[in-house]
């Protein structure tokens, strides 16, 4: 299938839809998931028009994963988590709901259950405060 320019992440990249941004560079954008599986659940997206892992250039994939590797420990520390889950879905059958390549960074605390994927919408004020906490840890306020 062809890349759909009307997907929610493409609209975010064009500035048509707001997000709780935590990081941006020339190749990627990172923001908080509005239906987080845990506090601090972030998404890192490529700015390349790619539906999934099989649709991205190797160079853009390397840049995307470099940002995931940079942000994951910062998010883990900012959220006081003991670990971090990295997830990436390819296709509806695998759980992908937005068809623009993205990687989930999900902070994990021992004994804390994950909320369902694509579950309940989080409070926007709480998301803004969490984004600020992560940006402060990154030094990008």
Image: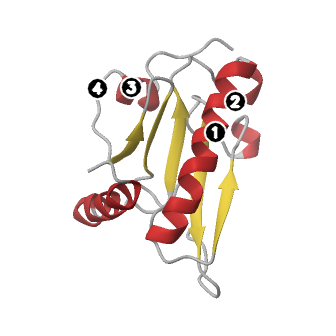
User: Mark 3 and mark 4 in contact (Cβ < 8 Å)?
Assistant: yes
Residue 50 locus on image (x, y percent): 62, 20
Viewer-nearest of discs 3 and 1: 1
Q: Residue at x 68, y 55 (%)?
A: 86
Marking on residue 66: 1
Q: Residue at x 40, y 42 (%)?
A: 23
Q: Quarter of the image for the N terminus: give it.
A: top right
Q: Is residue 82 left or right of residue 27?
A: right
Choose top left, top right, bottom left or bottom right for residue 8.
Answer: top left
The answer for how far apart the CA atoms under marks 3 and 1 are is 19 Å
Helix or strand or loop: what does disc 1 sit on?
Answer: helix
User: Mark 1 and mark 3 in contact (Cβ < 8 Å)?
Assistant: no
Viewer-nearest of discs 4 and 1: 1
Marking on residue 13: 3
Pick whichever, 75 or 102, lies toward us.
75
Q: Which is nearer the N-term, disc 3 or disc 2? A: 3
Q: Which residue is mark 2?
A: 62
Residue 117 appears in view: no
Q: Which residue is mark 4?
A: 15
Q: Furthest residue to the top?
A: 2
């Amino acid at each position: 299938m062809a890349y759909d320019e009307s997907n929610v992440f493409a609209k975010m990249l064009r500035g048509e839809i707001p997000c709780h941004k935590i990081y941006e560079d020339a190749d990627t954008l990172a923001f908080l998931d509005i239906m987080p599986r845990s506090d601090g659940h972030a998404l890192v997206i490529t700015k390349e028009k790619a539906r999934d892992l099989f649709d991205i250039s190797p160079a853009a994939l390397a840049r995307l994963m470099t940002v995931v590797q940079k942000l994951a420990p910062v998010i883990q520390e900012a959220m006081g988590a003991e670990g971090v889950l990295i997830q990436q879905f390819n296709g509806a059958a695998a759980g992908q709901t937005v068809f623009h390549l993205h990687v989930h960074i999900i902070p994990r605390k021992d004994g804390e259950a994950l909320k369902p994927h694509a579950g309940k919408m989080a409070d926007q004020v709480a998301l803004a405060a969490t984004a600020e906490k992560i940006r402060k840890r990154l030094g990008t306020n």
